[in-house]
Image (spheres, helix red, strand yellow):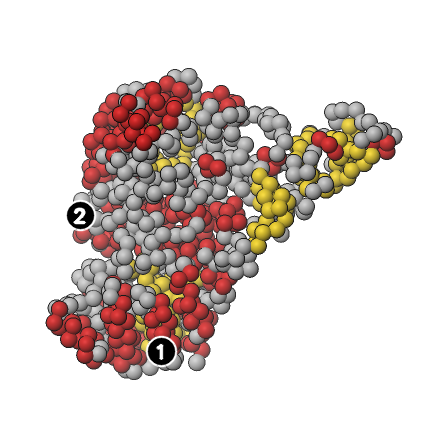
Amino acid sequence: MARHVVAPVGDIPAGECKLVSIAGRAIVVFNVGGEFFALNNRCPHRGGSLALGKLTGLVESPQPGEYCYSRRGEIIRCPWHAWEFDIRTGRSWCDPQRLRARQYAVSVEPGAKLVEGPYKAETFPVSVENDYVVVEA
Amino acid sequence: MNIELKQPLRAAKSKLAIVDCDIHPRATLEDLRPYLSNHWWHYIQTYGLRPRHGHVKGYPFPKPTPLASRRDSWPPGGQPASDLDFTREQHLDFYGIEHGILNPLAPSGQGDQNADLSAALAFAINEWQTADWVRREPRLKASVVVPYEDAEASVKEIRRRAGDRDFAHVLLLSRTSEALGRRRYWPIFEAAVEAGLPVGVHVFGYSGWAMTGTGWPSFYLEEGVENATTTQTLIASMIMEGVFERYRDLKVVLIETGFGWLPALGWRLDKHWERMRDEVPHLKRPPSEYLREHFWVSTQPMEETDKPEQLIDVMKWIGFDRLLFASDYPHWDFDDPFVSLPPSLSEAQRRAVYADNARALYRLG
Amino acid sequence: MPMTADGLHSIDCDVHPTVPDIKALFPYLDEVWRESIETRGILSLESTSYPRNAPITARPDWRGANGQAATGVAEIGRQVFDRWQSSIAICNCLYGVQLVTNEDMAVAFTRALNDWMVKEWLDRDERLRASIVVPMQNVESAVEEIERCAKDRRFVQILVLAMQEAPLGRRQFWPIYAAAERHKLPLGIHAGSSYRHPVTALGWPTYYVEDYLAQAQGFQSQVASLISEGVFTKFPALKVVLMESGVTWVPGFLWRFSKYWRGLRSEVPWVDRPPDEIMRAHFRLTLQPFDAPAAPDLVERAIEHLRCDDMLLYSSDFPHWQFDGDDPVPAGIPAALRRKILVENPVATYDRLNG
C-alpha cells in the first residue's frame, strides 16, 4: 500500500466525486459533507462504475407504510443494477455481511507536508498553499 | 456528479464473438416525423399515444431509473440509445459485438388503444430503424415492429419487410390483450413463417387487464416478477392452442423474460396435459416437446441462483442450443457480456450461447 | 401403500370433501337464504376451477355411482385412513362460495359451509381437521368468521383461493392476518379462482387445462404480494401454506424475485431480508401435485433446488387425480426427507395439531 495524492480538495466539492486511477485501479473518491471516502470503482455485483452512480439517502422502514429517510447523499447506487452501497463503509444494503465495495483509506493533507514526500502525486504538482486528498491503495 | 465521462479503465478485449439479441434504440417523435402522414402527426400532437394504462408520460409502476436506463448510458444532449455513435463507442465497439438485434420499445405504439395509430407508428419505426441504424451500421439488424392487436395490419407490415435482410425478426410484446395462442394472432405467425422470420416476444406491453390473475400489485418489484409469470401464460397458450401444430416452422424468441422458471413450466405443462389430453386433441405430442423445438430464450436478465450448479442445471434442462446472449442495452438491469455468463461453461457452450445459436437462428453471415 | 415413516403416521394436508348438492347446505342457512335459493333458482355454487367431470376433479376409481367423489366421510376414511394410513387429514372444501358477489349472501353461504363441515365431517370422524373458509368479499365479516370458527380447535387453518379480487398482500386484508396470527392459524391459499379477474394477465384462456395451469402463476403473484407488501414484517408469526400449487416453480421464482429485490430494495424498505429467506421461513407447500416427470433423479434435483427441508407438507389431494397407483409420494423424494414431509413438517406448521 502506498499513499497517493489524487486531487486538491477543491476539485471534489461536497456532494461530488472524482474517478481516479491509482496503480492501475479505478478508485472513486466521494466528498460527503467535507469528509472524504474512497471505494473501488467497480461494483462488486457485476462491475458497473460506481463513479457514474446516483447518490441518494437511505430509506428504511420499521413497518410497511412508514418511511424513515436519513443520510442524504451517503448511499451510492450502482448505475447498472441499482445496488445500494454505504459510502462510509462500502457495505451493500442488500447483503451487508457478504458483499461490499472495497474501501480505501482517505485523508486530507496540507500541501506543505506533502512536498516532503514520499507521496505520489498522480497528475499534477503539489503546492504548499493547498490541501490535498490522499488515498492509500 | 462532476465526472468526465470517459470509458472505464479497462480495455475491450475479447476473442469471443458476441451476438447481442436485445438492444433498445430509442426514437423521439421527431425522428419518426418523416415517416408519418400529416394526419397521424397531428393526431399524435393532439391526442397522443394512449397505452392501456392511463399515463401520458410514465407507467403504472415507475421504473427505478429515468427511462429504465443505466445511468451511464446518456449521451451528451440525448436520451439513452438515441445516438448511434455513442452506442457504438459505449457498447458495440467496447464489447466487440459482432451483431446486435434492435428491439425498439418506445415510442412504437404497440398495444395503443388506437390500432390505426399503432399501425402508423409501426411503419414509421421500422423505416427509422433501417434508415438511422441498420443502413449506417452493418452490425445491426432491425425488428419488424407490428401493431399486433390488428392482425391484418400486422400481416401487411410483415409482408412489406419480407425479404429485406435488414430485418431479423417480427417483434411482439408479451402482454397482449389476449394470450398469444389465441387465433386472432395466428395470421401474424403465418406471415412470419411465410417471410422466414422468427417471432420475438419481448416483455412488457399493457394488456388492459390487471397485471395478475388476482388483481393489481403495488410495486415495480412485483412487475419484475410478473414479467416471468405472464410469459409462462403466453407459452402455455401458444402450445395448448396448437399454434405449433399449425405452424411447424414457427420460431419464437423470448426476450428479457428470464429463463430460470422455464424447465419447471415444461414439467407442469406436461403433467397436466397428460391428465387432460382429451380437451386438446389437436396436440400430438407432449407440450415440452413443442417448447424444446420452437422456443429460444435470451439470457438477460441472467439468473442469480443460490449455487452455481443450479444455474448449470437449468441451462442444461433448457438446452445450451436454446440460449441467446442478450445485454438489454441501455436498460438498468443490463448484462455485461464479459461477466454475465457463468465461468464454468465449456468453450463450446460459451460459443453457442454468445454467438452460434443466434447466428443460426437469425441467419447472420 | 401406507404413508408412514419410522412407524409414524402421516398427516394429509389437503383433502377435498365435496358438497353433493346445494341442498346439503340448507340445514345451515337461514330461511331468508333457503327461500331465495329456491325462488331464484340458484342451482349451485360449483366453480369452473374444478368442473365436475373434468379428469383432475376426481380419479375415476374414486368416483361414486353418480360420478362424484368424496361426498361423505366413509370415502375419505377408506382411502386416506384405511389405505394410506394417515392419522389426520385436513379438509379444504372448494365449493365456490368465493364466487358470490352479494356480501350478505356470501357470508351466509360461507358460514353454512363451515357449519356443514363441522356437522357432516368433523363430528363424524375425529381424525379429520378443516380449514375455515372465509368470505373475502368483506374483510370484517372474514375476521368475524375466523373468530367464530376458531373456537372449535378442529379448525386448523384459514382457506382462501389463489386468485381473487386483489393480491393477498394488500393492506385491506391485514385484519385477516391479524386474526390468523392471534389464533395461530396458518393462512392456507388453495388453487382456484373467484374469477373477479380473468385467470391470467392476458385475459381469458380458451381451455380448462390453461385455467388449471394458470394457478401456478396465481401462486407466484400471491407470494410476491405477501412478501413485497411486508406482511411478514407486520405479522412475524404468520405462516402461509400453498396448496395444490405444483411446487417446482418455487426455485426459479425465488431466484428472480431476490435478484430484483437487491436492486429495488428501497421501494419496499420494510422487506428487511432477501425474499427467498422470507419464503423459506414463512411458506410451506403441500406435496401434490409435484410438477416433474416420473424421473427420480430429476425429482431429487428439483428438491435440492428448493434448499429447504422444512418446506414440503405431505398431501394426497384426494380425490383430485394427480397420480396413478397407490403412492402419493413421487419417486425420487430423498428417504431422509420422507419423515419430515409426512409427519414433522405438518406438525411444525399446524399449531393446533399439537393438541
Could you tell me residue C182's position as x and y percent?
Answer: 46, 73
Residue picked out by circle 2: B281
Q: Residue at x 33, y 54 (%)?
A: B215
C148, above or below C95, in the image: below
Point out the residue furthest to the top here: B136
The disc labelled 1 sits on which kind of residue? Arg
Instruction: Compare residues B276 and C349 and report the one nearer the observer.
Output: C349
Mark 1 or 2: the one toward you: 1
Chain at numbered mark 2: B
Instruction: Compare residues A69 and A84 and report the one nearer the observer.
Output: A69
Distance between mark 1 and mark 2 Cα atoms: 48 Å
Residue C292's label in the rendered image is none
Please give the count of numbered marks on the rendered protein.
2
Q: Are marks 1 and 2 on the same chain?
A: no
Which element type, helix, strand or loop, lies under badge 1?
helix
Point out the residue furthest to the front here: B46
Label 2, residues with CA under 10 Å away: few <14, some 14-19, many ≥20: few
Chain at numbered mark 1: C
The quarter of the rendered structure image containing the N terminus of chain A is: top right
Q: Quadrant of residue B168?
A: top left
Label 1, residues with CA under 10 Å away: few <14, some 14-19, many ≥20: few
Q: Residue at x 59, y 27 (%)?
A: B5
The disc labelled 2 sits on which kind of residue? Pro
Residue picked out by circle 1: C148
Point out the residue furthest to the right here: A116
Could you tell me residue C349's position as x and y percent?
Answer: 44, 69
Q: Residue at x 50, y 52 (%)?
A: C268
B340, above or below B286, in the image: above
Could you tell me residue A37's position as x and y percent?
Answer: 70, 41
Q: Residue at x 45, y 78 (%)?
A: C354
The quarter of the rendered structure image containing the C terminus of chain A is: top right
Could you tell me residue B73's position as x and y percent?
Answer: 51, 30
